Image: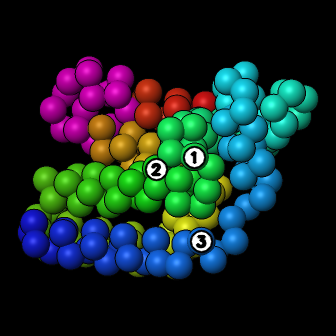
Amino acid sequence: SLPALIAIMALATALYSWNLSGSGLNSFYSSAIYSGTQSWKAWFFGSLDAGNFLTVDKPPLALMVMGLSCRIFGFGTWQMMLPMIVAALGTIWILHSSVKRVFGHAAAALAALVLALTPITVAINRDNNPDTLLLLLMVSGAALGLRATRDGRLLPLLGSAVCFGLAFN
């Protein structure tokens, strides 16, 4: 199962990062991310301008993650998209792990492959829209919720609530 997961994640990495600088990112979110590199207040609120006059129409968490990457590595396509590619790969890994526990290795590999190759998934993971982080948090929340119901423990249930809360912060 591990070689299959590694192959799927390598394929996903290639799909999500191939010719990334030519993919044409969303300028609306790029402006907010750039503003976040200029002002911590704009970073916190997901503002379109460093003066914090206008905010974007989505929750700011994904913009915060991309903005932090751009603050560390400089503003650019790769710097913006690196956290989203990592989040997409994390989503594949979490889905694989969750499905494997219940249905076995073959079903887990199939679920991971379907997620990695679904056209809309490829599209959102090649753009700077916040949907990639939303998907990661929702899959994580579902996986933790399943674990909570299976094990009858409170901590995974709280983790699930936190994931869903952050997804729609």
Give the number of the mark in front: 2 or 1.
Answer: 1
Q: Which residues are magenta?
A: 145-160
- Numbered badge on residue 74: 1
> Which residue carries the number 3 mark?
21
Give the number of the mark in front: 1 or 3.
Answer: 1
Residue 141 location, x and y as percent? Answer: 39, 40
Give the number of the mark in front: 3 or 2.
Answer: 3
Above or below 10: residue 58: above
Query: For residue 114, which quarter of the picture?
Result: bottom left
Mark 2, other Cα within 10 Å: few <14 / some 14–19 / many ≥20? many
User: Which residue type does callout 2 highlight?
Assistant: Pro
> Which residue carries the number 2 mark?
83
Above or below 25: residue 69: above
Q: Earlier in the sequence, mark 1 or mark 3?
A: 3
Q: What's the residue at 41%, 52% (across, down)?
A: 87
Local secondary structure at mark 1: loop
Q: Nearer the viewer, residue 113 or 130?
A: 130
Q: CA distance from mark 1 to mark 3?
A: 15 Å
Q: CA distance from mark 2 to mark 1?
A: 13 Å
Q: What's the residue at 57%, 53% (across, down)?
A: 80
- Numbered badge on residue 52: none
Q: Earlier in the sequence, mark 3 or mark 2?
A: 3
Residue 59 location, x and y as percent? Answer: 67, 37
Q: What's the residue at 50%, 38% (across, down)?
A: 72
Q: Are marks 1 and 3 in contact (CB under 8 Å)?
A: no
Residue 83 location, x and y as percent? Answer: 46, 50
Mark 3, other Cα within 10 Å: few <14 / some 14–19 / many ≥20? few
Q: Is residue 66 left or right of residue 115?
A: right
Q: Is 148 a magenta residue?
A: yes
User: Which residue type does callout 3 highlight?
Assistant: Ser
User: Which residue type does callout 1 highlight?
Assistant: Gly
Local secondary structure at mark 3: helix
